[in-house]
Amino acid sequence: AVVLGPGGVLLVRRSKPPRDGQWSLPGGAQKLGETVFETARREILEETGLSIDVLGLVDVVDSVHHDGDGRVRYHYTLVDVLAVPEDDDPKPGSDAEAVAWMPLDDIPGLGLWSETERVINLAVEMQSALED
């Protein structure tokens, strides 16, 4: 989920592969019978301690990771939603080393995956359009 609040965008430093140790958007696996929006709310609560209001779908992205021999090691289909927080004091959960509100101006210097940056920019545009 792309959670946008007064402090910028909510990011977690991942504690598990893939991309462990890197900043990323919070999220995780969908459970059987759970809607995409229910998954986003649950995962954000688990990873950051925040309750969110989901505003809509931003984009769908494939994340494919290969091993040294070129075989697919991970393939995730990421369903990114736009959300706003109901509170603003995040705390890292078990899947996150850290959680922070990152100012949007700081995003280009964090070394995020290019798709993460693109999705954050789309979410900012979507939020702006919803406010008009």
Image (cartoon, rainbow, N blue to C red):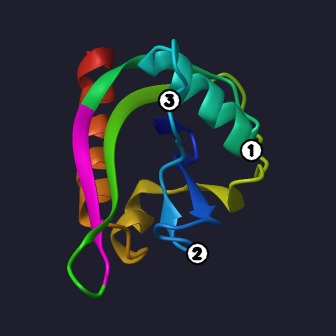
Magenta residues span 59-67
Give whichever of 51, 74 is nearer the camera.
Answer: 74
| Quarter holding residue 82 | top left
Residue type pointed to by label 1: Pro
- Closest to the camera, between mark 3 and mark 2, is 3
Which callout, 3 or 1, points to the residue nearer the camera? Answer: 3
- SS state under label 2: loop
Which residue corresponds to mark 1? 90
Q: Quadrant of residue 43?
A: top right
Left or right relative to 71: residue 32: right
Say what amino acid the circle numbered 2 marks: Gly
Who comes first in sequence, dot 3 or dot 1? 3
Q: Which mark is residue 30?
A: 3
Number of residues whose C-alpha sits closer than 10 Å to that of mark 1, classed few (under 14), some (14–19) or many (20 or more): many
* Residue 19, magenta (yes or no): no
| Type of amino acid under label 3 | Gln
Q: Position of residue 26 (x, y in %)?
A: 54, 46
How packed mark 2 is, by other alpha carbons closer than 10 Å (few <14, some 14-19, many 20 or more), is: some
Residue, x 51% and y 12% (percent of image)? Answer: 33
Q: Is residue 97 above or below residue 31?
A: below
Does any portion of residue 109 appear in the rendered image?
A: yes
From the top left corner, tell me how far across and down residue 27 is, in percent.
52, 42
In the rendering, at what x and y percent does residue 12 appear? 60, 57
Q: Which residue is mark 2?
A: 21
What is the chief secondary structure element of the magenta stretch?
Answer: strand
Label 3 – label 2 distance at C-alpha: 22 Å
User: Which element is circle 1 on?
Assistant: loop
- First in sequence: mark 3 or mark 2? 2
